[in-house]
Amino acid sequence: MLNEADSKSLVAAAQVPVTRDRLLPLNPGGAAAGLRYPVALKIVSPDITHKTDIGAVQLGIADAGALAIAGQTIVANVRKALPGAQLDGLLASEMIHDGIEMIVGVVNDEAFGPVIAVGLGGVYTEILHDVAYRIAPFCLAEAHAMLEELKGRALLNGARGLPPRDVDALAQALVQMAALAWALRGRLQELDINPLLVRPHGQGVIAADALVVLRPETKKQ
């Protein structure tokens, strides 16, 4: 399992935009100089998948002093909850406030190969179970067809005074992730982008968090 920083690097290599991040040591100190606030701060570890559940995420950090306190709190929470976890540092990420949360996942099925899933993210994921699936790879028209299957599709059109979302960018991201999953089908076991933030029309999408699980490389005889 790759940590968040490495997972997002792989997503970015597939031409899906990711947040501006900086990997910091567990005691950031001077390494945080020049950060653009506010930021989110998260633990970076290949052993932790649900960071929020153990207090390993702090949002809306406004300045360097708050960053130092948040870092200490996160590290203390993680070491209490998972004392044996490998800790690779802290990740400071830009805050995006105008996106609707989607979840994009990949599972490498033994029978079908890579299968792409997309659905509403955040609190809607577990409540609505509103997900569409396709076998990778697929074209842009098929990605749009996936989105049309979602019961919550109307939210992307704009609701309660909110602007319409960049559905074209979301569909393109699905195509890119399907292509990545197909290219790495020999090693990719699982991939999740949660959330993928869909911004107002014309402003694209951005992956705020990602998790990649790879199969071990097989040694050549």
Image (cartoon, grey):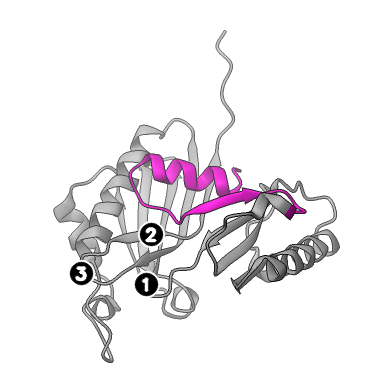
Amino acid type shown at disc 3? Glu
- Residue 150: horizontal and vertical position, in percent? 28, 72
- Who is closer to the viewer here, 131 or 199? 199
Q: Which residue is mark 1?
A: 99
Q: Quadrant of the C terminus?
A: top right
Considering the numbered disc 2 on the image, is that residue within a helix, a strand or a loop?
strand
Q: Earlier in the sequence, mark 3 or mark 2?
A: 3
Q: Which residue is mark 2?
A: 206
Query: How far apart are the alpha carbons under marks 2 and 1?
Result: 8 Å
* Vertical placement of residue 75 versus 101, above or below: above
User: Which marked residue is nearer to the observer: mark 1 or mark 3?
Assistant: 1
- Dot 3 surroundings within 10 Å: few (below 14), some, or many (20 or more)? few
Q: Earlier in the sequence, mark 2 or mark 1?
A: 1
- Left or right: where does residue 27 sit relative to residue 18? right
State yes or no: residue 22 in magenta.
yes
Q: Quadrant of the N terminus?
A: top right
Residue 173 is tagged as none
Query: How far apart are the alpha carbons under marks 1 and 3?
Result: 19 Å
Q: Magenta segment range? A: 1-29
Amino acid type shown at disc 1? Gly
Q: Which residue is mark 3?
A: 148
- Who is closer to the viewer here, 32 or 103? 32
Amino acid type shown at disc 2? Ile
